[in-house]
Image: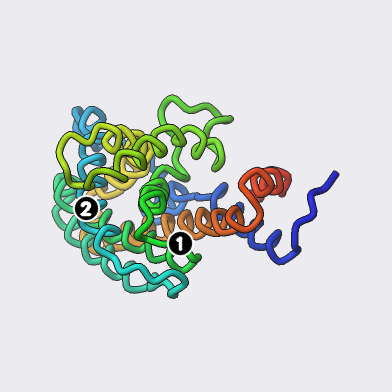
Amino acid sequence: MEIAFPESDRKDLQSAKNLLENPGVAAKVTNLIGTPIEKSFGLLPDNWKGNIVEITKTALMKAADAAIFTMKDLPGESSSNIWHKLGVATSGGVGGFFGFAAIAVELPVSTTIMLRSIADIARSEGESISDIEVKLACLEVFALGGPGESDDGTESGYYAVRAALAKSVADAAEFLAAKTVTEKGAPFLIKFITKVAERFSVQITQKAAAQAVPAIGAAGGAIINTVFMDHFQDMAKGHFVVRRLERKHGKDVVQKVYQDLPRLG
């Protein structure tokens, strides 16, 4: 039996699913550099794979400290997507000029700008940025649209990713209720960010491989960063539309309707 669900909300949910289940970031970058991105992996240093999760985790920690925890709490205010795209384009231009070797320096900057944009989108969908759980939901966006290495096809969908992160989100939220985000020895927060970093590092590896192409340069680095910003803005829009509908109808109802909706692509 079909669940009673307002048609306008069903359309919003379908749009959100279209964004969340069809990210296509690797395909966009492939079109940009004119060659399958996998062919560029060989241009990365031998120790890249071992370092990337740690680099990504550090970037996320710095971004969390500098971005959403300094924003004003104005639920419903429209997001400023274009300004954030310009910001990451600039940082990407610097990274593109110096090549993938600069990514450890450039990534915290671009990640901070992306996280502020994600939080801006959350706020535009009625979320309260002062809420600890919402801050974590913003960070959660970086885990969307990119499976972890241990995933199979059943574990990479939107609700599957949220389920995989649910325990670490709850533990981190409980910890942060009594502590500050910058306090040293925050094991639950670190565990959560590590889980997010494992997934986010998939896209960062693709980004680094693209920037390693000799012909990319500063202009190409700026475009690649804009592609990534566009991707995570899409993920954020889908994520926070779903959460808005969950607040209205309940998570179980929205999840059931979401799973029954067609998947495009």
Q: Residue at x 39, y 59 (%)?
A: 118
Is residue 75 in view? yes
**Is 7 in front, or is 25?**
7
Does the image show residue 40?
A: no
Q: Secondary structure at mark 1?
A: loop
The local crowd at label 1, few if under 14, some if 14 to 19, many if 20 or more residues have their Cα within 10 Å, is many
Furthest toward the right, the residue is 1
Q: Which label belongs to residue 38?
A: none
User: How many marks can you see?
Assistant: 2
Q: Is residue 112 left or right of residue 13?
A: left
Q: In the visual, does 237 lie left or right of 178?
A: right
Q: Which element carries disc 2, helix, strand or loop?
A: helix
Q: Amino acid type of disc 1?
A: Glu
Callout in the foreground (2, 1):
1
Q: Can you identify the residue that label 2 sits on?
A: 65
Q: Is residue 108 above or below residue 166?
A: below
Q: Position of residue 48 (x, y in %)?
A: 22, 33
Vertical placement of 194 versus 234: above or below? above
Residue at which label 1 appears: 127
Q: Amino acid at mark 2?
A: Asp
The crowding category of the residue bearing disc 2, from other C-alpha atoms within 10 Å (few below 14, some 14 to 19, many at least 20), is some
Question: Which quarter of the image is occupied by the N terminus?
Answer: top right
> In percent of the image, x 46 and y 56: which residue is there?
236
Residue in the picture at 29% in, 38% down: 189
